[in-house]
Image (tube, rainbow, N blue to C red):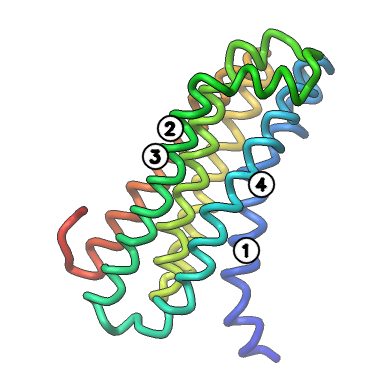
Amino acid sequence: MKNTILKIWPFGGYLIIWSILLYSDRFIFKFFINTEILSDHVTMQDLFNRLAIISGNVTAVFYPVISKNKGNKLFVDNYYKKQIRLISVSFISLLLILLFGLKPFLSFWLKNKYSFYIDDFSFLYLIGIMLFNFSIIQVRTLQAIGYEVYVLKILILISIFYFINVFIIGYYEKPYLLSIMLIIYSLIIIFKFHLKYVKQKTIHII
């Protein structure tokens, strides 16, 4: 029982921290911003996070293959790059389509019942959500090759700063800054974990 707990706790902790990064803002913002904007923010968040279906499914398929062959550096690197290519093509294609189609889609979906918040900041927030879901490639690859605890420690540290910044943004009633903050934190996660991967696998940066 003890050995089982020691094996699974990094994954359980990762899922908890990932959920905090995804959803903590809605619970903090409710104390500071009006209901209409909060409702639109949550609507965008829930809608855009459906993108996780793409990155989540791709990395879930590749995870056991990478884990089984983690001793083969060339094999792991090949599959790591395949994930990046597949998800990059998917997200960039969606981004180009939604560059022109996002507002008409939201207007149809929400039947024109939304605030200026969605109208002005939806595309920027979409980019943040895409980058955040892109970072799951680096997260799961490191987990697959044996760095589950390292991943969890870094995510805990990042989530603390993220939580504090969300509180500050909410306190000053500037929820639109969350989009920029999400982009910054997602890029930090991507590059931090990518560099760790490169260092440990002694391969060239893509």
What's the distance in space between the residues labelled 3 and 2, CA to CA? 5 Å
Q: Nearer the viewer, residue 15 or 98?
A: 98
- Residue position for label 3: 187
Residue 21: percent from the left, percent from the top? 61, 44
Q: Residues within 10 Å of mark 3 (few under 14, many from 20)?
A: some
Above or below, comparing residue 181 to residue 192 in the picture: above
- Residue position for label 2: 184
Answer yes or no: do the residues labelled 3 and 1 have beta carbons within 8 Å? no
- Residue position for label 1: 13
Above or below, comparing residue 148 to residue 89 in the picture: below
Q: Which type of secondary structure does the marked residue at label 3 adopt?
A: helix
Q: Which type of secondary structure does the marked residue at label 4 adopt?
A: helix
Q: Residues within 10 Å of mark 2 (few under 14, many from 20)?
A: some
Above or below, comparing residue 15 to residue 188 in the picture: below
Q: Amino acid at mark 1?
A: Gly
Q: Amino acid at mark 3?
A: Leu
What's the distance in space between the residues labelled 4 and 3, CA to CA? 17 Å
Whichever of labels 2 and 4 marks the residue nearer the N terminus, that label is 4
Whichever of labels 1 and 4 marks the residue nearer the N terminus, that label is 1
